[in-house]
Image (cartoon, rainbow, N blue to C red):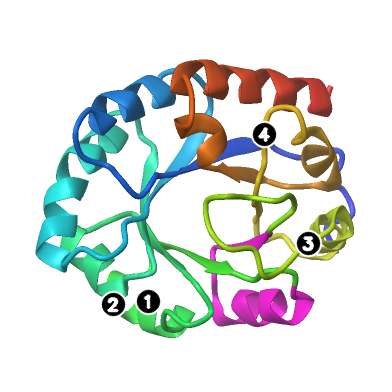
Amino acid sequence: MNEEADVDREPTLLYLISPLEVGGDFPARLARALDAGDVAAFQFRVKDVDQHEAARLAEPLQAICAEREVAFIVNDSISLAKRLKADGVHLGQDDGTVEEAREALGKDAQIGVTCHDSRHFAMEAGEAGADYVAFGAFFPTTTKQTKHVAGTDLLEWWQAIFEIPCVAIGGITPENCGDLVRAGADFIAVSGAVWNGDEAAAVAAFKAAIAEAMA
């Protein structure tokens, strides 16, 4: 039991997820976002491109993250994460196992698992050695189709029992993140709320909202 969770909790940090389009001026936008606040990790999420093209797109973004000591996490693909020597991989329920990722990427890799609204999936991921679990969606989102809806009680339950960090994801904005922070989210995963507008202003707004919720 992690009974002192409320006493010595680390501040909730941002976990940025890329838009699907990461070419063009996106590297400059990423740099602005990372320089605007407390970002712990960046997830590289592209679809429908081959691995060679994905690696080309990832290279400048990975360098930007490395310069700022922000973890560079690859979405879905263990093989791409290994090719890039990424800091870790984020696995959906159909993207391979934690054990496969650990064997391919090594003991220091950050391995996260999407657990939707399932306590069972989360406990399985933790027992398999995941470094974090992700719950959601907490709010309606246009980034991807929402099949699962999670409540803040899930975060409270996880925080009370487990020491593995949890990530809240799905439709989160500076205006609605406070309840998730107070419920125990270690990380707030955001995409559209940052990239659909001024990314630096959005990150600063999240930073302020998180600080207010933790006060």
Dot 4 amino acid type: Thr
- How far separated are the C-alphas under marks 4 and 1? 31 Å
Q: Earlier in the sequence, mark 4 or mark 2?
A: 2
Tally the numbered discs: 4
Asked if labels 2 and 4 touch by Cβ distance under 8 angstroms, the answer is no
* Mark 1 neighbour class, 10 Å CA radius: few under 14, some 14 to 19, many 20 or more: many
- How far separated are the C-alphas under marks 2 and 3? 31 Å
Q: Which residue is mark 2?
A: 104
Q: Is residue 55 visible?
A: yes
Asked if labels 1 and 3 touch by Cβ distance under 8 angstroms, the answer is no
Q: Report helix, strand or loop for mark 2.
A: helix
Residue range (magenta): 118-136
Question: Can you say whether 185 is above or below 212 in the image?
Answer: below
Q: Quadrant of residue 63?
A: top left
Counting from the top left corner in percent of width and height, residue 193 is at 57, 34
Question: Can you say whether 188 is above or below 170 in the image?
Answer: above
Question: Can you say whether 69 is above or below 2 in the image?
Answer: above
Dot 3 amino acid type: Ala
Q: Quadrant of residue 173?
A: top right
Q: Report helix, strand or loop for mark 4.
A: loop
Asked if labels 1 and 2 touch by Cβ distance under 8 angstroms, the answer is yes
